[in-house]
Image (spheres, rainbow, N blue to C red):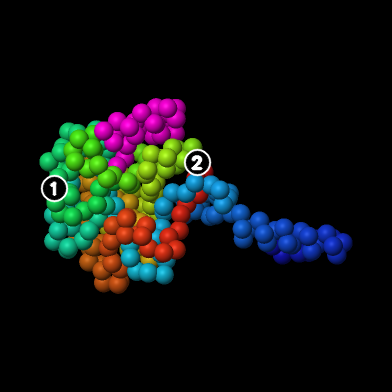
Amino acid sequence: MKHFYSIRLKKWKRYVAVILFALFTASFLWFQRDGTFSVLSENDPLALTKGNENEPEIALTFNISWGEEKVHDILKKLKEKQVQATFFVSGEWAERHPDIVEKITEQEHELGMLGYRYKSYLKQEIDEVRKDLVQAKDVFDKLGYEDMELLRPPSGHFNKEIIELAEKQGYTVTHWNVNPNDWKNPGSQQIINTVMEQTSNGDIILLHASDSVKQTAKALDTILQGLKNKGFQFVSISELINQAHAESKPAK
């Protein structure tokens, strides 16, 4: 920045340059936590990535697309600490494990979906994505969950076209902004450190409940109580959406 101002420009050119630079950085760029930039536009469709940063509510979310063992330990930890979470499950998994889906909702956790098959939507044609969403809806309707409104695209992969399609079908695309990559099993303490250090008001935390996670349930022992001790309140994604001033992430 010092070099920018040391350039000798005619007076009017310098003023124009400064104004354009300020407008560009302040109004048109969104810097994401993964280090990438996205251009903002008032007309771009949005994905929910954070709630009200002025309130201490946070949302704990779990993705699950395969396996039936680890989810029970996680549900047990949540019940012990009286924490409500939002579970995003694939239609294919729900079809195979309707009893576990019922257990999740019986414990008053919120239910969202990951489409039908857990396959990146960016690797499919838009018509294939549309069919996947229709198939998923059919599955959840048959299981008695007709009011499904939350969608998290597989692997968090989406673009403007996918969000527009989801919105037309009545879904709110839901992302996250705290991700300890627990599915990589980096160690319980690493999972704990990432969540405890990065979580702030309105954040959406991504964890997993598929059988790939070996350390998540143990990490929850510290995370759940630790976040409570910091004054955070666990709420569902729908509650975050209902809060005023919710922030959203522009589609890439």
For marks 1 and 2, the one nearer the N-term is 1
Other-residue count near label 1 (Cα within 10 Å), few / some / many at <14 / 14–19 / ≥20: few
Instruction: Report helix, strand or loop for mark 2.
Output: helix
Q: Which residue carries the number 1 mark?
A: 103
**Residue 98 part of the magenta segment:** no
Q: Is residue 136 magenta?
A: yes
Q: Main secondary structure of the magenta part?
A: helix
Q: Which residues are magenta?
A: 113-138
Q: Which quadrant: the N terminus? A: bottom right
Residue at point 76%, 59% (across, down): 17
Nearer the observer, 45 or 121: 45
Residue drawn 36% across the image and 60% down it: 242
Amino acid type assigned to the residue bearing label 1 in the image: Lys
In this view of the protein, which residue sits in the foreground, 15 or 129? 129
Quadrant assignment, res 191: bottom left
Mark identifier at residue 160: 2
Q: Amino acid at mark 2?
A: Lys
